[in-house]
Amino acid sequence: MNGFLLNGKIQNVNSVDTTIIQNELDKLNIQETNIQNRIDQHITEYLDCIRRKI
């Protein structure tokens, strides 16, 4: 059975336009990548700072 959960009940659907969902997932993936890149940059800068002090 194809459907989705809405207000605790399964709602039947014949077809779903997943374009909006895919676009939102793409945006979230981009945000996740940007956050991970910033974290990686901070870690790199921190490690470089430690290396200079050693």
Image (tube, rainbow, N blue to C red):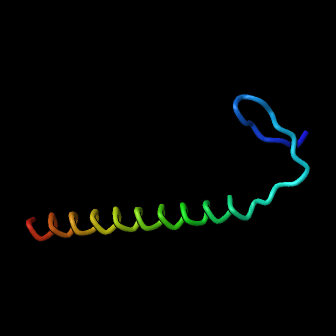
Tell me which residue sits at (22%, 64%) in the image.
47
Residue 25 horizontal/vertical position (percent): 61, 60
The foreground one among 6 and 26 is: 6
| Quadrant, the N terminus | top right
The foreground one among 53 and 7 is: 7
Residue at the limit of the structure toward the left, as seen here: 53
Above or below for 9 versus 31: above
Tell me which residue sits at (43%, 67%) in the image.
34
28 relative position to 2: left or right:
left
Residue at the limit of the structure toward the top, as seen here: 8
Above or below for 7 versus 40: above
Residue 49 horizontal/vertical position (percent): 15, 67
The foreground one among 33 and 46 is: 33
Tell me which residue sits at (47%, 66%) in the image.
33
Q: Quadrant of residue 4?
A: top right
| Quadrant, the C terminus | bottom left
Tell me which residue sits at (21%, 64%) in the image.
46
Q: Exactly how many numbered labels are in the figure?
A: 0
Residue 16 horizontal/vertical position (percent): 82, 55
31 relative position to 1: left or right:
left
